[in-house]
Structures are given as structure tokens and as C-alpha cells.
Image (cartoon, coloured by chain):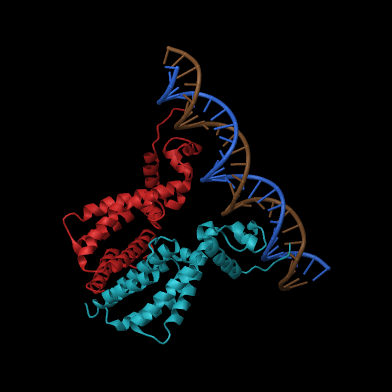
Chain colours: A cyan, B red, C brown, D blue
Amino acid sequence: MSKNNISDELIITTSARLSSEVGLNNLSLKMIAEELNIKSPSLYNHISSLDEIKEKLMIYGWKELGEKATESAVGVAGYEALRNMCYAFYDYATNNKGVFTAMLWYNKFESEEKNEATTKLFSLLFRVLQPLNISDNNIEHIIRTLRGFLEGFVLLVNNNAFGNPISIKESFDLSLDIIFNGMKSLEGVE
Amino acid sequence: MSKNNISDELIITTSARLSSEVGLNNLSLKMIAEELNIKSPSLYNHISSLDEIKEKLMIYGWKELGEKATESAVGVAGYEALRNMCYAFYDYATNNKGVFTAMLWYNKFESEEKNEATTKLFSLLFRVLQPLNISDNNIEHIIRTLRGFLEGFVLLVNNNAFGNPISIKESFDLSLDIIFNGMKSLEGVE
DNA sequence: ATATAATAACTAATCACATTAGTTAAGTCA
DNA sequence: TGACTTAACTAATGTGATTAGTTATTATAT
């Protein structure tokens, strides 16, 4: 009955790893507790429910992604930077399936803590999009386009929904070509 | 203890309705059984597990969507037909949230039954895309682009992930503009 | 018609969690 | 050192899926 000094962060990183191994839906307090060598009720000394862990995974994921995306855009600009950020998203989401699943229906307007999780990512995104000569209003829409496409595409990849033999990477690249070319038709509009 | 003659179809349509009311994750055998005025173990005379019901919801949804999409494309062609089909997807998925959730990671290569569920939809899609002067290979990629975007965007809508006050319909329309314009840059390529 | 078989209900039981309640030992700090 | 707080623990509850075993109802075959 030693006090293991389990930190909140350890619970989250452990949950992140486990959820990516077994799928977010199969993540259980039992499993997390076993991994930490404690009994599952003991987790309640640190968290209030399994749902709370999933909420924290969501925030954790968006923060981590913000950092990866930032690194990916160092030294580049415009559509090239945007493409790198999309690749960073793809890589992070496919390498951290459980966390990505938790991130899915993030809404930054739900709490200050959530809002903070993407401050960095959003400011980067605006910095990249702003010089493209697209109206602010359309930039807001485009962010939704990108988020919809990226989350949807990766969701399908992660769940083996593409049965075709054709290359997924080529599909992703061509999709970005399509979207970026489409965006160009909005340059100078409004 | 009368034999109510509960058909497989009644189980599915009931599950479809309930899942859209309470969310697919909250759909339970208990709830379905109560709605059908039987006890939950009795359901096992008709189905083998809750997961099987979800699989059947997936197939049911894609079939229904195939019909709605077909109706939407009557009398139109090209990008206009494609746009109507996208609207049909949006409408169906937002009006049948539970079924849509079950449809998410459909993979037609997993079984003959699944493949059949989208035969109609795919033949329609090819009929619409083929005259656009885009290579067959790129058409395959574009289908993934569209599916990724549509599923992702609607997933976000259904889960209130867009907190912004700006119009979701405008975002959807502009997204389709972007994608269709981007597709035009592939006309005559390869 | 009647005996037999198949089916679709039922109740009772098991199992796997999440979560709560109540207890106790381990560290903290005056 | 002694009171306090904390983080473990065990025991208990509740929910829902699933299985086992039973029985009444319907269908089928003689």
C-alpha cells in the first residue's frame, strides 16, 4: 500500500498509449489501473470518471498536435506550410489513433481550457492563411473545410475503411492538391 | 408470452430510430427490447449481439442513402448532380445521426453483403464522374476525397464541434465550391 | 385432429466493468 | 510527536451484455 505518487500526467500519457493500442472505446479504468499497478477504484483519487480522462486526452492531443504542426511549418510559408501542417496532422493522427479518436469533436468554445489547447495551432493557421489574399470570412470557412476533410480522411484510414488497393498516400496528396487549387479560386474574392 | 412476430427489419428500424435519438453509443439491447415490449435476452432469438445490430445499421444506412442520393440526382448531371448528392448525404446524415455514426467506417470489401449495400450508390457516382474528363485513377482518389470530407464535416456538425457563429451551410457550400473547383484542375490530366 | 418439432418468449444466473462507501496506512507539517 | 491529508485498499452496488435452462406457442407432418 505504498503511495506511488501517480501524477495526473502519468495517467494521461498511460491512457494515451493504451487507447492507441486497444482503441479508445476499449479503454477501461481497469486497464489503466493495471498498467499503473493500482486497483481501479484508486484512480478516483486522481480523476472523477473515465469520461474525464477522455476529455483530457482530447486536450492533450490538440496540444501535442499544435507542437508537431508548428515544427512542420518552420521555414516555409503559404501552401507549402499548409501542406506540411496537413502532413503533421495525418502523421500524428495515424500514429496516435486513440488520442485522435478522443480529439474528434473538439469544440474550443466549450471551455477556457479547451480554447487554450489550440491557441498555438490557430494562430499558426491564421499566420499561414492570412497572406493568401483570401477574405477573413472565407478563411473561417476554409478552416472548417480542412478540419472536416482531415478528420474524416484520417478516421477512414485509421479504421481501414479504404479497401481499394490504390495508394492512400496518393489519395491524400491529390486531395490536398484539389483543396489547395480550389482555394486559389477564392484569392481576391470579396 | 405471446409470440410477437418481431421481424429482423423491425429490430433494425427501431434501432435506427433509437440510436438517432440517444446516440449510437448509448443504444442498448435493454432499450431496444423495451421499445419492442420484450425482455432483452429475447432479442437473442433474432440477433447474435449488439455489435451485429450496429453492423446491420451500417448496411441499412448505406442502402437508404443510396436511394436518397439517387433521387437527388434525377434530371441533372455533372457537378450539379454531384452537389445534389452531397446535399443528400448531408441531409441524411444530420437527420439520422445514429445510423450515420454506424455508417462511418464502412468498407465495402469486407463482405458481399456490404458491397451490395453501395452498388447503387457507386454506379451512380461513376456515372456522374465519368463524363468530367478526369482519369479513372483520379476518380478513385476523388471518391476518397469526397468521402473523407463529407463524413468528417458531418461528424463535426452532428457533434457540435463548430462553435463559431458563422453559418454551417455557407461553410458546406464553400467547401463544395473549393473541392469542385479543385477537381476542375484535374480535367484532362493523365 | 394429434403428436412432434421448432421457435420465441421468459426467468435466473454470470460476467465485466464503472462507480461509491468506508477503511487504513503513509507521508506532511505544525 | 501528533493531527491532518492523501492515496491506497477492500467491499458493495448498479447497469448492461450475454448465456443457460425452461415453457408456451406456432408450425409441420402424420
Residue A96 coordinates in the image, percent (x, y): 50, 68
D27 on left or right of C3: left
Where is residue A141, by image quadrant? bottom left
Q: Of D15 and B8, which appears nearest the observer? A: B8
Q: Of B11 and B35, which appears nearest the observer? A: B11
A60 on left or right of B190: right
The number of callouts visible is 0
B172 on left or right of B2: left
Q: Of B155 and A169, which appears nearest the observer? A: A169
Residue A67 coordinates in the image, percent (x, y): 47, 78
Residue under the image location 47 percent in, 77 percent down:
A68
Please say if B108 is above or below B171.
above
Residue A190 coordinates in the image, percent (x, y): 21, 77
Q: Is residue A127 visible?
A: no
Residue under the image location 64 percent in, 56 percent down:
A41
Direction left: furthest residue: B75
Please say if B19 is above or below A133.
above
Q: Quadrant of the N terminus of chain A?
A: bottom right
Residue A76 coordinates in the image, percent (x, y): 39, 86
Please say if B90 is above or below A185.
above
Q: Is residue A39 visible?
A: yes
